Amino acid sequence: MAELRPELRGRFAVDEPMAGHVSWRAGGHVARAYFPADLADLAEFLRRLRPDEPLLVVGLGSNLLVRDGGFNGTMVFSHAALNELRHESAGTLYVEAGVASPKVARFAANLNLIGVEFLAGIPGTFGGALAMNAGCYGGETWQFVDRVLMLNRRGELIERKADEFAVGYRHVGLKATTDEVFAGAWLRLPAGDGTAARERIAELLAMRLASQPLDLPNAGSVFRNPPGDHAARLIEAAGMKGATEGGARVSEKHANFIVNPEGAASAAAIESLIGRIRVEVQQRFGIELVCEVRIVGDAA
């Protein structure tokens, strides 16, 4: 793949350490990494990539764990590259996948568009919010999606309507199986009081700061909330709050967060702690917690 570099405008790297790219500050290396200059550059890169190459698009790494043995494939880093955010028409925003979700909330409020204040509490990029229908504080991303821009492995851009996707709680998938990834989306938002929206954003950020261990490396909520209950309540009731493994710890502030206080925990330790939590909750309450965090790669 070295011969690609003169023809592309982004940065290509091999054996890239992932601990610096994920919010847990842990994990192995990725065999090949590409940091595109923009969407057109990414499309050109994908056109030249082998069709059988394992590929993962990463935003801010806030919902990802790469096992200590690394990922034997290519990761594309969208943040700071797919960063276009614009007001297209009355009530419509275009957001590329690499834009940080809180930036979308503030941008909308400044245009007196409301509804997406909750995005201020989503720590990742908008592409990740699209991929998992991210939500909090009563809002979900796909409530406002009008249509999306997809990018396939041949470097082709395809515009799709929202109804072409099966959307659920923390899960989104095309109804027809494809090799496409999210490049951007158009949001349709109602007009409203921008001042009130900005006040709501400040309120949500204060709530998040008070209830979540934001001062320590973490990956946000580790588990989905089961129907009619909260994962954090179950984890605490199972006696796992404060449990530790190899430097990783279940947060005392919010039991659905695993923190890596000293940055010394391995990916294996974090994954093992995730497994222990699931076993304890299953044994005590008969509820199987579903992990929200994406875990990829090989064990060491």
Image (spheres, grey):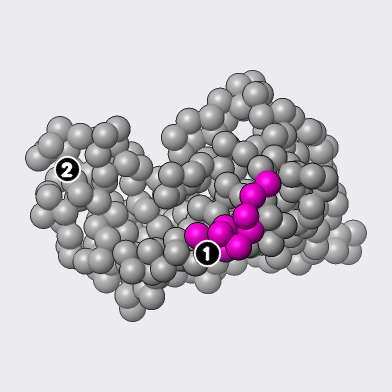
Q: Count of labels shown?
A: 2
* Residue ID for mark 2: 281
Q: Secondary structure at mark 1?
A: helix
What quarter of the picture does the N terminus occupy? bottom right
- How many residues crowd around disc 1 within 10 Å: few (fewer than 14), some, or many (20 or more)? few
Q: Residue 5's x, y, as percent?
A: 83, 62
Please provide the residue range marked out in magenta. 191-200
Q: Above or below — where is 141 with respect to 68?
A: above
Q: Give the label, 1 or 2, closer to the camera.
A: 1
Q: For the point 26% across and 44% down, which residue is it?
A: 230
Q: Are the residues tagged 1 and 2 within 8 Å (C-beta)?
A: no
Q: Quadrant location of residue 172?
A: top right
What quarter of the picture does the C terminus occupy? bottom left
Q: Residue 132's x, y, as percent?
A: 52, 41
Q: For the point 35% across and 51% down, which residue is it?
A: 222
Type of the residue with mark 2: Val
Q: Above or below — where is 257 with respect to 178?
A: below
In-image side of 183 versus 214 (left or right): right
Q: Earlier in the sequence, mark 1 or mark 2?
A: 1
Task: Confirm whether residue 275 shows in the render.
Answer: no
In-image side of 27 versus 212 (left or right): right
Q: Quadrant location of residue 194?
A: bottom right
In-image side of 173 versus 2 (left or right): left
* Residue ID for mark 1: 199
Q: For the point 38% across and 64% down, which residue is it?
A: 207
Task: Confirm whether residue 85 shows in the render.
Answer: yes
Q: Is residue 106 magenta?
A: no
Type of the residue with mark 1: Glu
Q: Secondary structure at mark 2?
A: helix
Q: Quadrant location of residue 216?
A: bottom left
Q: How far apart are the alpha carbons under marks 1 and 2? A: 37 Å
